[in-house]
Image (spheres, rainbow, N blue to C red):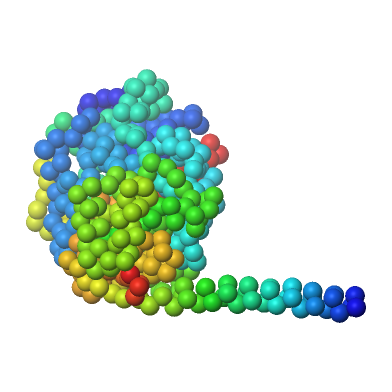
Amino acid sequence: MIFQKFKDFNLKDFPVIIFGSGPAGITIALELEKKNISSLIIEAGQEEYSEESQDFYSGKIIGDNIANLSSSRLRQFGGTSGHWGGWSKPIEDYNFKSWSITKEELDKYSDKTCSILDIKKKFNKAELNKYFNQIEFQYSKVRFADKYKEHIKKSKNIHLILNCQLSHFDGKNNNIESAICISNNSIKKIKSKHFILACGGIENSRILLWTKEKSKELINNNLPIGQYWMNHPWIISGIGVINKKKLKEKLNNSFIDYDGPLHFAAKENLLNEKNILSASMYMSAKDDTKFYKEIIKDILCIAPEYGKKIARSVFKKNLKCGNIFMQIEEPPNKNNKIVLDSFKKDKFNIPRVNLHYKQSKESLYTAKIFLEEFANLCRTEDLGRVALKENIYNLSTFENMGGYHHLGGTRIGNDKSTSVVNSNLKMHDINNLSISGSSNFPTGGCTNPTYTIVQMALRLATNLANEINK
Amino acid sequence: MNKNKQRRNFIKKNLTLLFSFSFFNLGLIINDLQIRVLKKKKNFIWYLNEKD
């Protein structure tokens, strides 16, 4: 059932209260429902976002430029899935090295994840050489609110309340007693056995930091809440031309031929041998004809022999030509962090966030080395030719066009000095609070996070159901 | 007579094999030794071969 404002339910009917109705929150509620466990989802936004609602998300960025905090996420039913690009893929195997959960544990939930995201479980890889794989994404069109609205409306086990803002948690002795919420301008104290915080990669930290100030006996002061915040720098690192026919010949039968972009990822060898982070690159599925011609003209000018050769391939439609986009990993850095503003508060008197963020030199170095190796491969095997943007080549700076993937802040781990939740996603030193979402990522890899968020949410729901049904 | 023919055939076969390996290797070496040339055009550094 869906309610537009808080209603006085018999809260004993809901052993689980979930804050946030994005991909993580809805996935958990759906999975609990399958196990006959009722849950109440509390969403601060409305069915659709509005300017007024988005204002709750505004905050200050201190340091390097990154996407605006209020436009890079949505405060509405379905959360940020309301405007996500849908790119879905499991993160690379080697990215799990510093995670306290294994890839195998998450892979158990792959079928269900694909079903939720309405995608095929098809993530082929084709080995290009010892450093690169061609990789395959699936593109989800799921908007969680659109897909699950009717289901939730009819559900007896899932109740969703809109327009109800969680302020903070209250409790002591390692136990949350109530969640303090604001609905219809009045304060509600919500009690339950289990609370799940699934409000996104910034709000999860914000609410815990505010809880730390309001309920001093509840949270371990040494936990690095809000720290090690990361995103995926998304940049244009160069331009290039790739001869698809030659690439197909090289990859033989394993070439991934589909409608999506031509996508390549670094293999573990490249990371280890060159001491770089994870990265992937792609060229758009659609060609910009004007830009295409410009690139061919440039090549004819600086490399006439090669230019003549590829000009002939233009008519055979064998060429992929255009910008080279990259998505790069950022190393976890304690000083990239979310903190509460000391003065500015929102309408509900909750401090706004300040995001301290500095671009990483390692990410810039990764972009250069990755593309340089790829350019050398294309050149020596005559698969095409690649050019690096001068600022990447000189290691001066990069322009991040994204910053929409908010990672870290409540990292998973066993060491309380570098993590906030344990491997079961329960907050350290609190018995009845679990946290879900990309804020749990201890490292970011370079893959879009939603697929992994859904896998982790399914795992959390399964573990919680086992605990409740014991 | 037969023995000599056998020997000749054996040498011929192996020499062919030996030469084919040499050409194969030579091809690889040439490929690896493509001389890299960097050229700048409109804020982009192109990674090219000398013969390009």
Asked whether residue A249 appears in the rendered view, the answer is yes
Relative side of A359 to A17, left or right: left
Q: Residue at x 45, y 30 (%)?
A: A33
Does residue A277 sit above or below A172 in this rendering? below
Where is the C terminus of chain A found, in terms of image quarters? top right
Q: How many marks?
A: 0
- Horizontal and vertical percent for residue A30? 42, 32
Farthest residue toward the left? A343
Comparing A11 with A160, the one in front is: A160
- Horizontal and vertical percent for residue A143? 31, 34
Q: Residue at x 36, y 67 (%)?
A: A375
Comparing A45 with A165, the one in front is: A45
Does residue A321 sit above or below A87 in this rendering? below
Q: Residue at x 48, y 69 (%)?
A: A269
Relative side of A119 to A295, left or right: right
Q: Residue at x 42, y 30 (%)?
A: A38
- Horizontal and vertical percent for residue A216? 26, 56
Asked whether residue A224 appears in the rendered view, the answer is no
- Horizontal and vertical percent for residue A278? 39, 63
- Image quadrant of residue A408? bottom left
Farthest residue toward the front? B1
Comparing A250 with A317, the one in front is: A317
